[in-house]
Image: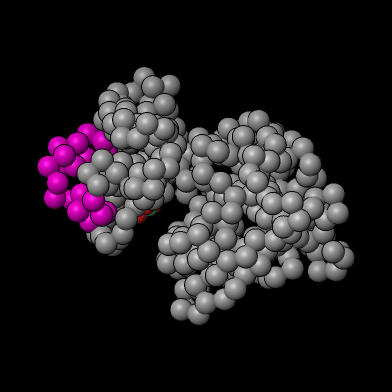
């Protein structure tokens, strides 16, 4: 690929590489301009010899459907300018461990994982690579293997996690904006991640344990028994972490507003449970519990939810 059109602030060819060809990875690959995006094969995944691309149908939010073909990256021939990481939180360190050595050291890495903990682990493991995190409300799912649906039109905020990523923020946002999706720079991405974590900590585990849609938790006795204490624990951990302080009642209002506005949705954690996949509980209530223990805060409800979700599936 020629350097024509590449952003001079970014290294490489102008190509955006994506690690993680699940729903979110396929959504971004389908919206970014063809010829400017490639998937990175996972070292433990079998990409059939001779198969040079991944093809699927993308149903866009406006109802139109298109066939998408995304090449697998040959990083020695085309070093990418930006890497988007859309793996599950629990797979991220391993996936990067086997991928980053083949990629340019100055290439910004944008982490799209749910919850918190995995992003911080990556920034600590590779302090010299520019690392950014994204918080997105775009909704995508894969009702069948060859079809990806853009189910919820949202927004994405991107911000630096390492100091060396700060000067690259606007170039990265500009590169992602070529998708036509709404992308904003965010200097305090930790706060954005916390804001989303608070909602997920109050909805996801309950839906997975009760096997119900988001709105149905609100009247369930198990939710009503624990939500007050859960919000008190989250408020105390937030304050100790130095984030924007929020009263337990304000946290509960935020959780319940989202549970009502997404009342018919199957949460990502319930969906993981239904598909027999490992859940992200360790990066949601498990993260709140870990940070709480560091600060000596009683986090018994977060711990209880984490343990119970682990007990749901042999591998969760
Ligand atoms: O994880 C999810 O499913 C979503 O973030 C939320 C907000 C709980 C809606 O389903």
Residue 269 in the image: x percent, y percent? Answer: 36, 46
Quadrant of the rendering where the N terminus is positioned: bottom right
> Image quarter for residue 128?
top right
Question: Where are the magenta residues, as a range?
Answer: 212-232
Q: Is residue 165 left or right of residue 158?
A: right
Q: Is residue 153 left or right of residue 32?
A: left
Residue 237 in the image: x percent, y percent? Answer: 37, 32
- Position above or below: 215 against 57: above
- Position above or below: 118 against 55: above
> Image quarter for residue 230?
top left
Residue toward you, 85 or 167: 85
The residue positioned farthest toward the top in the image shown: 296
Residue 236 in the image: x percent, y percent? Answer: 33, 32
- Position above or below: 276 against 254: above
Q: Is residue 251 visible?
A: no
Residue toward you, 168 or 138: 138
Say which residue appears at 62% left-offset and 70% top-offset.
68
Say which residue appears at 73% left-offset and 65% top-offset.
36
Residue toward you, 72 or 78: 72
Say which residue appears at 21% left-offset and 40% top-offset.
227
Residue toward you, 201 or 316: 316
């Amino acid at each position: 690929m020629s350097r024509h059109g590449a952003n001079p602030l970014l290294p490489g060819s102008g190509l955006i590489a994506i690690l993680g060809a699940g729903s979110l990875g396929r959504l971004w690959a389908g919206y970014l301009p063809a010829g400017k995006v490639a998937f990175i094969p996972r070292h433990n995944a079998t990409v059939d010899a001779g198969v040079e691309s991944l093809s699927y149908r993308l149903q866009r939010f406006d109802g139109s459907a298109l066939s998408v073909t995304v090449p697998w990256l040959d990083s020695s021939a085309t070093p990418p300018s930006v890497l988007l990481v859309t793996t599950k939180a629990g797979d991220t360190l391993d996936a990067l461990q086997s991928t980053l050595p083949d990629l340019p050291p100055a290439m910004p890495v944008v982490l799209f994982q749910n919850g918190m903990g995995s992003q911080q682990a990556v920034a600590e493991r590779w302090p010299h690579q520019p690392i950014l995190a994204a918080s997105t409300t775009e909704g995508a799912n894969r009702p069948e293997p060859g079809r990806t649906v853009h189910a919820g039109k949202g927004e994405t905020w991107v911000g630096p996690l390492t100091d060396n990523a700060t000067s690259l923020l606007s170039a990265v946002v500009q590169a992602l904006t070529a998708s036509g999706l709404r992308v904003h720079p965010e200097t305090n991405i930790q706060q954005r991640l916390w804001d989303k974590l608070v909602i997920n900590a109050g909805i996801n585990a309950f839906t997975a344990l009760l096997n119900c849609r988001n709105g149905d938790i609100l009247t369930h006795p198990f939710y009503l028994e624990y939500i007050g204490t859960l919000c008190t624990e989250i408020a105390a951990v937030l304050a100790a972490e130095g984030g924007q302080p929020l009263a337990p009642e304000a946290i509960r209002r935020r959780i319940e507003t989202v549970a009502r506005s997404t009342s018919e949705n199957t949460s990502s954690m319930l969906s993981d449970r239904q598909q027999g996949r490992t859940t992200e509980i360790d990066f949601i209530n498990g993260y709140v519990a870990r940070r709480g223990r560091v600060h000596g805060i009683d986090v018994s409800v977060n711990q209880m939810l984490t343990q119970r979700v682990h007990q749901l599936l042999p591998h969760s």
